[in-house]
Amino acid sequence: MRVLLRCDGGPGIGVGHVMRCLAIAEEATARGHDVSLAGIVEGELLTAALHRVGVTVHPVPGRLGAAGDLPDEAVWTAQDVVHVDSYTVSTDLLDVLDGLGRGSRPTLSVMHDGRDGRRPCDIAVDPTLGAECTPRPAGATWSLRGSRWVPLRPSVRTLQRLDGPAPSRPLRVVVVMGGADPAGCAPDAVAAVQAAATSLDVDVDVTAVASPRTRDRLDALAAQSDGAVTVIEPTPDLAPHLARADLVVSAAGTTVWELCAMRVPMALVCVVENQRAGYEEVLRRGMACGLGTPADLRGADAIGRLAHLLADHGVRGELARTADEVVDGLGAWRIVSAWETVVAGARPAPEPSPGRGGGGPHTSSDGGDATTLSVRPATVDDAELLLEWRNDATTRAASRSSEPISLEEHLRWLRSTLARDDRHLLVAADDAGPVGTVRWDREAPGEWEVSITVAASRRRSGLARTLLLAGEQWLSDAAGQGQVDELSVYLAVVHEDNTASLRLFTRAGYLPDTPATSEGFARYLKLAR
């Protein structure tokens, strides 16, 4: 697969877009894909990072902050995927690619942050925390929303700070306000940390990342600190510094996600307005301590919050544990897997119909005449039919456990299942009789894993996809009526050798969520909105 990444970065506009693209580039090249980058990239930090990954850079017209859309046509027309991570590239890019003619144009993937950078595309990726619970953006064929898709570099994923006892040495604090520090607030953050440490009479060693506009002020603070402040240049190798820290004071940008994956406690500054939504959501979830805006760093509130963090090892550890639950480090893997799946021919499922009620019929016209399935919750009266389906040889072979089930064991399981609120077992039928079952198991808040069984007598009749979509419709309707807990994600676990199930789920809008386990089971997901 040939991939072109379109982004810009450097002093004055920041490095976040390029660093996200580089994380994806590392994942894609590790899988053997051909990756290049188009854009204007300036500054030693980014040029060194690009050189390390070995990504070819194609220039685009214009200048940093006002760059053109694409390089020479011969470059981008030869791609399988064009991935845009920019707020300034034209919103008409999909029309430009469509002008190549159907069947010849690249798949257009777009990284956006809420509304910033959003444009019509084939695959829209919004890694904003909580975005999976927001409506899908208009103009996107596929929409990947939420912190699952935060792209992190492999060097970050392999570093994770272990939460041991409170250190007897001076506390290590890193201050990093992004590659550009547009507000020039790193010196104020260092001064706030020093003031907090002084109020507690504790020793703190501070490492501060300088930008051209803050270097002189940071050097002055270091000279006055008797060795307690060290100033370093922006570097692609910052992750080890962060992983060793007891606390990181950071801008609320892309560094936040690296800190989450590394389990490092953080105090955040909302440096620019487009960080506001993410900053507030991180605080709402208890993943970090908020220090406000750059102007707030000199105030007593920010210093007091820092003092509270420096004084309490337990509070810092709880922040880190909460953050670690949100970002698992597989974002780049998921993005590249989505590209591979879509380029290979996966297609999204139709939009769900308006709520019909938890037991209403689902109608699908997939592959021919419309098929109507009635879906209802199972009862104990279905026990023998359900056991027959569960013990079918084909069903057992595709299950995690292949041993046949006795009637006594099945009845215990069925009664227990019907009494649970974290499991919903459905029976589907059409005019010809029973078709199969759909079972939903809650794996995490808002996340439900599906298992489907098509009756042996109804196989090879093209009903599996309709059955799956009918089950999704029932769960969506039931969630809308408050009959089940929140719903944000449908999940499916499929063995990598089960080509029929893989084809079923990728044709129903599911994309890879986790790599296959040692037993060969991989997880797929589909957003419920």
Image: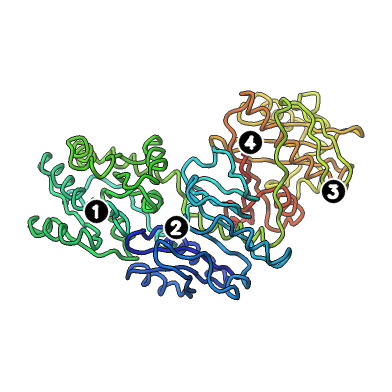
Residue 431 shown left or right of residue 468 in the figure: right
Q: Position of residue 91 (x, y in %)?
A: 56, 55
In 3D space, how far apart are the residues under numbered discs 4 and 1 (Cα atoms)? 49 Å
- Image mark for residue 367: 3
Label whose residue precedes the other's in the sequence (3 or 1):
1
Q: Which residue is mark 2?
A: 152
Q: Which residue is mark 4?
A: 441
In 3D space, how far apart are the residues under numbered discs 3 and 4 (Cα atoms)? 29 Å
Label whose residue precedes the other's in the sequence (3 or 4):
3
Res. 420 visible in picture = no
Kindly state the secondary structure of the residue where label 3 is placed. Answer: loop
In 3D space, how far apart are the residues under numbered discs 1 and 2 (Cα atoms)? 25 Å
Q: Who's the residue at 25% across and 59% down the image?
A: 209
In 3D space, how far apart are the residues under numbered discs 4 and 2 (Cα atoms)? 30 Å
Label whose residue precedes the other's in the sequence (1 or 2):
2
Front label number (3 vs 4):
3
Q: Which residue is mark 1?
A: 184
